[in-house]
Image (tube, grey):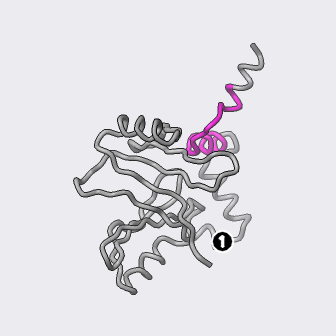
Amino acid sequence: MPQPVVHFEIPADNPERLSRFYSDLFGWKVEKWPGPMNYWLLYTRNKGAAAIDGGMFRREMPDQRPVNYVHVPSASEYAQKAERIGGRVILPRTQVPGVGYVAILSDPEGNNIGLFETGAAPRAARKAPAKKAKAARRKSAGGKKARRAAATRSKPSRTRSSKTKTKAARR
């Protein structure tokens, strides 16, 4: 089964200026990500339209170019496969807190391509019986309220939170 492109990233010298450019040009919604990195989320989708969303970050090297990310079940396994067939690993599997894992490869002609692995439980926990994995998540997350709060913080929302809606309804 083919692996789909699920995300793109654009490096920027001035992310604020470039945010306005893409917003004005294409109507994309741009939000600063509340996570631990300087990162801007680019929302490109309209209701019912097939599209992917992306991100923007401050350029770290002068020759940095946009990268497309392909969803894969294991970034490590696909990186190894790429090396076997002539590619090169630029960035090994790296965790993005609250999101998942990424890796960046260079194909045989020097084009960079990203790998995105969904942020599921660590491999050992996925292999464990479901009850054990669920109990481990509960224990490490500090209870139901803490898990909900962590899930809310790790997923940027495009709408007002239910807490905000509740406050507005009381008024």
Residue at the front extreme? 25
Residues 55 and 153: in front is: 55
Q: Is residue 12 within the magenta segment?
A: no
Image location of residue 65, percent across then percent down? 32, 57
| Magenta highlight: main SS | helix
Residue at 50% x, 42% y is 26
Q: Is residue 170 left or right of residue 84?
A: right
Residues 116 and 131: in front is: 116
Image location of residue 158, percent across then percent down? 61, 38
Residue at 33% x, 76% y is 88
Q: Is residue 29 left or right of residue 133?
A: left
Q: Is residue 162 left or right of residue 74?
A: right
The quadrant of the image that shows the N terminus is bottom right
The residue to which callout 1 is attached is 128
Q: Is residue 154 within the magenta segment?
A: yes
Residue at the right extreme? 170
Q: Is residue 31 above or below residue 71?
A: above
Q: Which region shows up in magenta?
A: 146-164
